[in-house]
Image: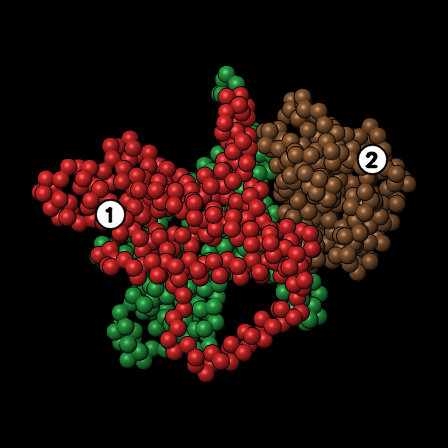
Amino acid sequence: MKNALKTIALAAAIGLAAISGAAAEQVRVGFAAEPYPPFTSPDASGNWEGWEVDFMKAVCAEAKLDCVITPVAWDGIIPALTSNKIDMIIGSMSITPERLQTIDFSDKYYNTPTAVMGPKGVDFDATPEGLKGKTIGVQVATIHQVYANKYFGENGATVKEYQTQDEANNDLAAGRIDAVQADSIALKAFLDSEQGAACCEMKGNVKDDPEILGLGVGVGLRKGDTALKDKINAAIKAIRANGTYDEFSKKYFDFDIYGG
Amino acid sequence: MMSDETVSAIALTELPRKESFFKPHRIVLMGIAALLVFSIVWFMRWDWVPKYSGRLVSGVGVTLLMLASTSIIGFLLAVPIGLVQVTGPWPLKALARGFCTVVRGTPLLLQLWLLYYGLGSLFPQFPGIRNSFLWPYLREAWPYGVAALTISFAAYEGEVMRGAFAGVPAGELEAARAYGMSRFTLFRRIWLPRAVHRALPTLNGETVLQLKSTPLVATITVIDVYAVVSKVRQETYITYEPLLLLALIYLCLTAVLVVGFRYFESKIPTRGA
Amino acid sequence: MADAGSMINWGLLALEPPGWGGVLLAGLWNSIQIAVGGYGLGLLLGTGGAMGKLYGGPVTKDLLEVYTTLVRAVPELVLILILYYAGTDVLNQISAALGWGPVDVSGLAAGIFVIGVVQGAYSTEVLRGAIKAVPAGQIEAARAYGMSPGQILRRITLPAMLPHAIPGLSNLWLIATKDTALLAVVGFSELTLVTRQAAGATKAYLLFFCAAGVLYLMLTLVSNVLIVLIERRYRRGMAEPA
């Protein structure tokens, strides 16, 4: 009996010991805990790979930060930042006026258009008229969710919201939805995969609305964390200037992802 | 098998008693609670509630619909599952026992994702299914949610039914046989009603547990009240207030269930001996 | 579509990359750690809670009643979300108020805390029921011997109530192992989440979800064997339950 109690106490103590004071220079980088190729994707050895992983490594090396990847559910990534579970978000998060009310952003580090894909053999455009009466899948808590609801949802389309982009893609391939709206690069990565190539094709880019779609992707930061923001901005500028940015981008893209 | 005591330890099955509620210390505690509620209402943000109230109500509707349909179908399935474990031929017995073990031994969330993302993505590969009249339903998310919740309820309640069938006193069955009842008549008139009667008290706890499982369907795009609240959180960037409201909603739903079951139980003359 | 067997790529489950077996096992290990930690924390809270509910003052009793009522009436998923975000937030604000600066709570500690608080309420109820099953005469006799409340707890109440508590506590352990899956919703890398990631990355949904199901089932079955052994040990000399 005594032993049992001791064991329990020990187990609890070990659990609590995991709570420790913050290390000096460690920065917890929040990643969406899901495959989002070609930007962030878990691989079979339990590591993360992709363009944004390379970007993070370059920025952290430049800014001399000890960055630790912390996977967080995408739909809770902003609360995780504001409640101090992570220190910054690197998750293809677009800088929008709406998000800026809650969190802060670094300068943009890439900017790509938003597109719509659909099944092969069904012709429609990425316009409110083209998507009328169709079911369109988007990831929750994204600019695409807001955009699709405003432009398509209010014009006779049904918007279905998924927790991860990957699940929306999968449901399109399974024929459960008629279209998916997302970042054009992320869609292209899916269309290059075996499953995507077999079922689906790009239907075109949507009309831009900077108020919703934002002005590019930035590193999400807590408001008031200006020291970190300055470091990140300086590092982005430096890797853009010294060619590191172009070097790792070349591995993934044959065009300039930084955008205009 | 989970005993009644364990079920009531993890699911609320009784409301706190009313008698001698007002004691001196309670008045102080209630004062503190009132202050807490007041500061939650006053200092936190609730301006989003009117905008989403319609959706919240329909979300509660979906939750209740899920709860009612899956509990009822699940219970109907639980009867044969319990019965064959007591009296069935061995292949059926083994099948029913295996079903209960597998379903009760794995998390519901995993079963749900297995059905929706695993099985669901397999269906369209068969043209026969894709062209059938079922396809418009199989495209939707809710049938998978209903299926997963029903299976789970059937497995847990199936264990209860097994105990209930086994626990009907042998003398009653023998008496019925002595009256010359056929096997079927015996089952219909004596065995089934007595077993269901014995299992009824567990339904309260199992149903509350089922209510506590329903929000999982939000992870496969069913818009229940949990999904509505998640949407509020994403659109307004408010972290805690929607969750507090959600907890309050579930608290009320549980309380209604408990009161309803108590009323229902008081209508039944005797509880299973 | 002709041959279903050839559709299954068993190589995806290999322990070494490019197989995802190693990742799944690491997820299982995380799940087990959280289940053990959360269950342990829950037992500590539950022992305190049961004592408080039975022997505490009126205020303690009422507060504990509120705690167990809330946890038993609100879905685990909702509690996990609230505790997961609020837990760290509150800790940080306390720490900031004391001038210690931000506290780094690891995902593991947060998971253990969340599961522990939920389990604490459940085991409060289980242990309270078990303690009530101990004949009052035994405790009165101990009191008559002049034992202190601590001694009574250690020498009489806990050992005597254990056989009554074990069935309930073993069920709580099984619930704890399955509740860890809910942490997938907040993005903690336990078995269910890594399974979903592996499935998403490889598109082999059915294969990975089934594999994870087998791992959970094995955990349950192994637990069941241990539970039977433990029950046998602690029920020595007691009449078989009816």
Q: Viewed as shown, does residue C75 lie left or right of A222?
A: left
Q: Residue at x 65, y 33 (%)?
A: A134
Quadrant where the C terminus of chain A lies?
Answer: top right
Q: Is residue B15 above or below residue A154?
A: below
Q: Which residue is mark 2?
A: A257
Q: Residue at x 53, y 53 (%)?
A: B60
Q: Which residue is mark 1?
A: B193
Q: How many marks?
A: 2
Q: Residue at x 34, y 73 (%)?
A: C152
Residue C182 location, x and y as percent? 53, 48
Residue A211 location, x and y as percent? 81, 47
Q: Which chain is red?
A: B
Q: Viewed as shown, does residue A25 lie left or right of B234?
A: right
Q: Is residue C93 above or below residue A71?
A: below
User: Could you confirm whether marks 1 and 2 are on the same chain?
Assistant: no
Q: Which mark is residue A82?
A: none
- Give the residue type that dot 1 points to: Pro
Q: Colour of chain A?
A: brown
Indicate the chain on which mark 2 is placed: A
Q: Which chain is green?
A: C
Q: Nearer the viewer, residue A243 or A88?
A: A88
